[in-house]
Image (cartoon, grey):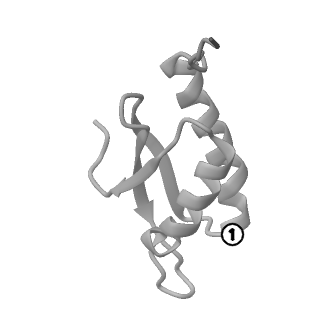
Amino acid sequence: MSVLRRKRSRPQADVEHHIRHELAAILPILRIDQCAIELQAFDPATGTAVLFVKGGCPDCDCSPATFMQGIETQLKLRVAELKAVLATEESPG
């Protein structure tokens, strides 16, 4: 009889650091200088990240929310613990 082993999960702080690192790598691709997207919260129980979104593109009037589907896809590919990404325009504090 084989024993099923659970994959060890990383500490929440490590996952949050990884999400921030990957956001920093993804955002320059968008080339929106006046846009801010920051990790506001991560829930390890659900695998959900909440991103604070502010600003937009002054040239084309696109808001960062327009790019959220692509950002979510890239983050989920790069951070194994991530299952969902939500965006908020409410200030983190």
Residue 75 placement (x, y as % from top left): 60, 50
Label 1 SS: loop
**Amino acid, disc 1:** Arg
Q: Is residue 91 left or right of residue 23?
A: left
Instruction: Give the total of numbered labels.
Output: 1
Q: Specify the quadrant that holds the N terminus.
A: top right
Residue farthest toward the front in the current orientation of the protein: 1
Q: Is residue 17 left or right of residue 46?
A: right
Residue visible at 36% across and 36% down in the picture: 46
Please tell me whether residue 73 is drawn above or below residue 46 in the rendered image.
Answer: below
Residue visible at 37% across and 57% down in the picture: 87
Crowd rating for badge 1 (residues with CA inside 10 Å; few <14, some 14–19, many 20+):
few
Per the image, the residue denoted by label 1 is 31
Please tell me whether residue 24 is drawn above or below residue 59 in the rendered image.
Answer: above
Quadrant hosting residue 88: bottom left
Residue visible at 71% across and 60% down in the picture: 28
Q: Is residue 58 left or right of residue 41?
A: right
Q: Is residue 75 left or right of residue 54?
A: right
State the residue in front, 73 or 62: 73
Residue 7 placement (x, y as % from top left): 60, 20
Residue 56 placement (x, y as % from top left): 48, 71
State the residue in front, 24 or 58: 24
Q: Specify the quadrant that holds the C terminus.
A: top left
Residue 67 placement (x, y as % from top left): 53, 71
